[in-house]
Image (cartoon, helix red, strand yellow):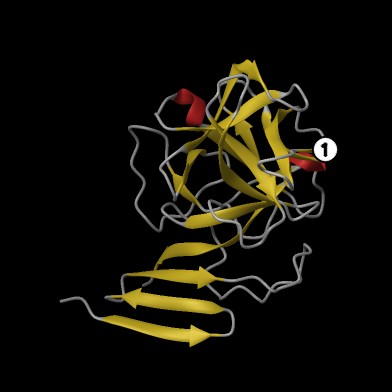
């Protein structure tokens, strides 16, 4: 039998399973502004890892990526991926996964430059894009939630130097540190456009699409989540 010990702190919850692997439940400060306003991240838990269940927020406006629950009425007619400032909105957690037919051990750090997939933890739809469909509000490249699995689910992780967001950094994906996600098949960047807002039935949501990646609309950070890690 594996012993489970749980310790509570003001910064989160850590559950250690057999002293081999742990899950860290991290909650940011109620102040959503970035950077530096959340509680200090627990030492040893600074990296984003495979199998972790995370929220992605844009740097500029603290808009979190979500699977909205509605389908596009145009384009692919797949499920709409949107952005929301509602901290409590459901369908905002995504599991960090390797590409299809590749294996990554849960708790392993994600290296900058890796190809990854992000799967909604609520209904197994992948963050997806394709060059054949335009987004409904801006006419950019559509981003959707895809229930199948193909190369349109693959994104290249670009870690960004927080001191100079025009420079790509090496190393590992670090929590609350800027990244860009480049769609591997089309070389377009994930973006959230806060000047493109939806109406009913998803009022208050913003368009998520793919663009050139030339401005801050393409900068994201990993915020809240359930993070796995190896414990030695």
Residue 229's place in the image compared with 113, above or below, is below
Furthest-left residue in view?
1
In x, y percent, where is residue 142?
64, 25
Quick check: 160 above or below 141? Answer: below
Horizontal and vertical percent position of residue 203? 72, 45
- The residue lying at 74 percent from left, 56 percent from top is 62
Instruction: Depth check: give the residue in front, 17 or 168.
Output: 17
Q: Residues within 10 Å of mark 1 (few under 14, many from 20)?
A: few
Kindly identify which residue carries mark 1: 215
Quarter of the image where the N terminus is located: bottom left
Front residue of 150/196: it is: 196
In percent of width and height, residue 178 lies at 70, 51
Horizontally, residue 106 falls left or right of residue 186, namely: left
The residue furthest top is: 132
**Numbered disc 1: secondary structure:** loop
Res 204 seen here: yes
Q: Is residue 166 visible?
A: no
Q: Which residue: 43% across, 85% down?
A: 7
Q: Nearer the viewer, residue 86 or 220?
A: 86
Q: Taking 30 as reference, is 71 left or right?
A: left
**Residue in view at x 72 percent, y 36 percent:** 207
Taking 106 as reference, is 167 left or right? right
Viewer-proximal residue among 196 and 98: 196
Position of 30 with respect to 147 (left or right) is right
């Amino acid at each position: 039998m594996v012993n489970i010990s749980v310790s509570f702190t003001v910064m989160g919850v850590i559950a250690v399973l057999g002293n081999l692997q742990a899950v860290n439940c991290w909650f940011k400060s109620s102040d959503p502004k970035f950077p530096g306003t959340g509680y200090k991240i627990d030492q040893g838990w600074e990296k984003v890892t495979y199998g972790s269940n995370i929220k992605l927020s844009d740097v500029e406006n603290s808009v979190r990526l979500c699977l909205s629950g509605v389908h596009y009425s145009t384009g692919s007619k797949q499920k709409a991926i949107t952005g929301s400032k509602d901290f409590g909105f459901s369908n905002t957690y995504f599991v960090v996964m390797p590409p299809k037919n590749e294996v990554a051990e849960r708790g392993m750090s994600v290296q900058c430059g890796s190809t990854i997939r992000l799967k909604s933890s609520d209904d197994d739809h992948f963050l997806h894009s394709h060059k054949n469909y335009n987004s409904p509000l801006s006419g950019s490249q559509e981003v959707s939630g895809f229930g199948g699995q193909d190369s349109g689910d693959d994104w290249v992780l670009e870690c960004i130097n927080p001191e100079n967001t025009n420079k790509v950094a090496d190393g590992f994906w670090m929590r609350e540190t800027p990244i860009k996600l480049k769609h591997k098949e089309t070389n377009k960047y994930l973006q959230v456009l806060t000047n493109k807002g939806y109406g009913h039935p998803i009022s208050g949501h913003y368009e998520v699409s793919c663009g050139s990646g030339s401005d801050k609309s393409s900068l994201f950070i990993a915020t809240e989540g359930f993070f796995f890690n190896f414990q030695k």
